[in-house]
Image (cartoon, rainbow, N blue to C red):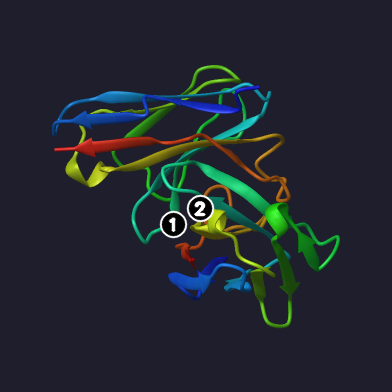
Amino acid sequence: NAGVTQTPKFQVLKTGQSMTLQCAQDMNHNSMYWYRQDPGMGLRLIYYSASEGTTDKGEVPNGYNVSRLNKREFSLRLESAAPSQTSVYFCASTPRGARDIYNEQFFGPGTRLTVL
Amino acid sequence: AQSVTQLDSHVSVSEGTPVLLRCNYSSSYSPSLFWYVQHPNKGLQLLLKYTSAATLVKGINGFEAEFKKSETSFHLTKPSAHMSDAAEYFCVVREVYSGGGADGLTFGKGTHLIIQP
């Protein structure tokens, strides 16, 4: 099992450019998440998908869109990148429903994004 | 609403000495609590989790944490630090009924653990 994989590992964009961050998990998990990590801020939830076909906003959704393509894949899109979106982005997944509070989340290795 | 406070942004200990990373939480309901570790340029790995089965929770790599409801704390400890423990540690709280984030998962800001040789 590869677990949670993310592509690309690194990306540099110019302001206004668009891109999609890809995430896939091979653990047959129902719920998937996108976080951003900024220094001294911990992780903040951008969007999540409780199950295939559903997505919901998290704490910091502005400037992002997501697609739950199928059970395995959950992508994050930046339509018009801004320097404030420079961050490390993590994808995560969890086995059962989002309401199961004892489920831990499994994280991918992250994507380091710089917007100039 | 829930929140979590990691009381130290940096902790420095000598190799072989005990480690204490402090975490306090607030939650309107009975929460679940997690500690994650992040090594440099890596993703997050689960160290341990509290699920109400036992107040003293043992995790990987010799770490453990004790849930103290009266003190609303979930401090992480290890009897003897190893150089490989140098990393960022995150305390995470989760409750079913959340007034904040969509999934009720809240991260602390992290504690950077430094191990002196």
Q: Could you tell me which quadrant the N terminus of chain B lies in?
A: bottom right
A29 left or right of B87?
right
Residue B45 on image: x %, y %? 59, 45
**Amino acid bearing label 1:** Gly
Relative to B16, is A19 on the left or the right? left
- Tag 2 secondary structure: loop
Q: Is any atom of residue B108 visible in this view?
A: yes
User: Would you place residue A35 above or below residue B59 in this image?
Assistant: above
* Residue at screen point 39% across, 39% down: A89
Chain bearing mark 2: B
Q: Quadrant of residue B49?
A: bottom right
Which of these two is toward me, B116 or B35?
B116
Q: Residues within 10 Å of mark 2 (few under 14, many from 20)?
A: some
Residue A84, compared with residue A7, is above or below; it is: below
Q: Which residue is mark 2?
A: B101
**Can the viewer see residue B1 in this picture?**
no
Q: Which residue is mark 1?
A: A42
Image location (x, y in percent) of residue A105 = 62, 42
* Farthest residue, direction front: B117
For mark 1, name the chain: A
Residue shown at 23%/25% (left/top)? A18
Amino acid found under the numbered disc labelled 2: Gly
Element at label 1: loop
Q: Nearer the viewer, residue B91 or A77?
A: B91
Q: What's the CA distance linking mark 2 and mark 1?
A: 14 Å
Quick one: which residue is furthest to the bottom in this view? Answer: B70
